Image (cartoon, grey):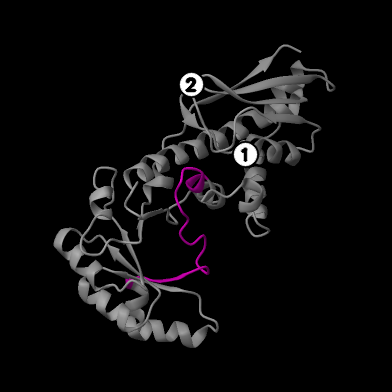
Amino acid sequence: MFTSWAAFFTPEGRPLLQKAIALALEEDGPELTARALFAPDAQLHAVIRAKEATLVVGLPVIGEVLRALDAPFHWQALAPEAGAVPAMTEVARITAPAEPLLKAERVILNFITHLSGIANLTARYVRELEGTGVRLLDTRKTTPGLRWPEKYAVQAGGGCNHRINLAQMLMLKDNHIDAAGSIAAAVAALRARYAPCPPIEVECRTPGHVREALAAGVERVMMDNMEGAALAQALALVPPEVEAEVSGGVRLENIRAIALTQPRRPDFISVGRLTHSAVAADFSMTLLPA
């Protein structure tokens, strides 16, 4: 279910978003061109357009960026957040002083084009899962510093979020299990260390690993890079009360077949390319007559 911008960026996430915006503005340095061409009190009016048919995601970043520049401004959304629009639709209008508006332009567009692209790709995967009851998850394969807005965009596209950090859910991978000696020993160590212990997920590469994880009583089992008969065998081992996730090698062309695996469907399918390979949507900002 899609969570609004204000609700998604919690007291934990909002400072990280603000740091990302501050870094993006710092990278650009001062807007010397606008400073030379416009009077200090010049006001500009601008419109943002979607230049292709797309979901529109990230419009609230307009206010976030202009507030970071400590500029007086007004902006109006002309399209619903996470809504679909046809090409050449006006999605927002902005009024602000010339220098901060032109400094903010590229930062605003970079966020909106990137987040809308993630939502578009996510929506394509979600459509492939319609009617299966399987939920689409993102991963931590996100752009450094942009995890929160990227996971927001996945929700806007109809997907669900996997853990947003390493503490929300404890995932045992090969390196952890090798260090502990076994899945059982690793699970026992986590539960001995943390009270209450966050949910535990185990990354499994064989049906044998799935049996070990289930014997240890974990909350979720991930079938990692399993295919065909091995995947079906592994999923069939997982009882309904334990969550089953499939990851690795998932593409638009095969996700529906994976979701319909019999006799036991996965509860989740996670796809890293939602965030690491989405193509940016095409938006532009142009000035309007005063």
SS of the residue at dot 2?
Answer: loop
Screen quadrant of the C terminus: top right
Q: Is residue 231 left or right of residue 115?
A: left
- Find the residue positioned furthest to the top: 289
Q: Left or right: where does residue 224 sit relative to residue 15?
A: left
Classify mark 1: helix, strand or loop: helix
**Mark 1 Cα within 10 Å, few/some/many (few <14, many 20+)?**
few
Which residue corresponds to the image point at 25% horizontal and 75% vertical from the top-left? 209
* Range drawn in magenta: 153-174
Residue 227, x across and y down, in percent: 19, 58
Does the magenta segment cover residue 171? yes
Who comes first in sequence, dot 2 or dot 1? 1
Question: For the residue carrying disc 2, how many other residues have a C-alpha within 10 Å: few (<14), some (14-19), or many (20+)?
Answer: some
Camera-nearest label, 2 or 1: 2
Q: Can residue 182 be spotted in the picture?
A: no
Between 200 and 99, the one nearer to me in the picture = 200
| Figure label count | 2
Residue placed under numbered mark 1 in the picture: 27
Q: Amino acid at mark 1?
A: Glu
Of residues 271 and 38, which is closer to you in this image? 271
Q: Position of residue 166 (x, y in %)?
A: 50, 67
Whether pointer 2 and pointer 1 mark residues with C-beta atoms closer than 8 Å, the reply is: no
Q: Which residue is mark 2?
A: 87
Q: Residue at x 24, y 47 (%)?
A: 254
Residue 151 screen position, x and y as percent:
51, 50
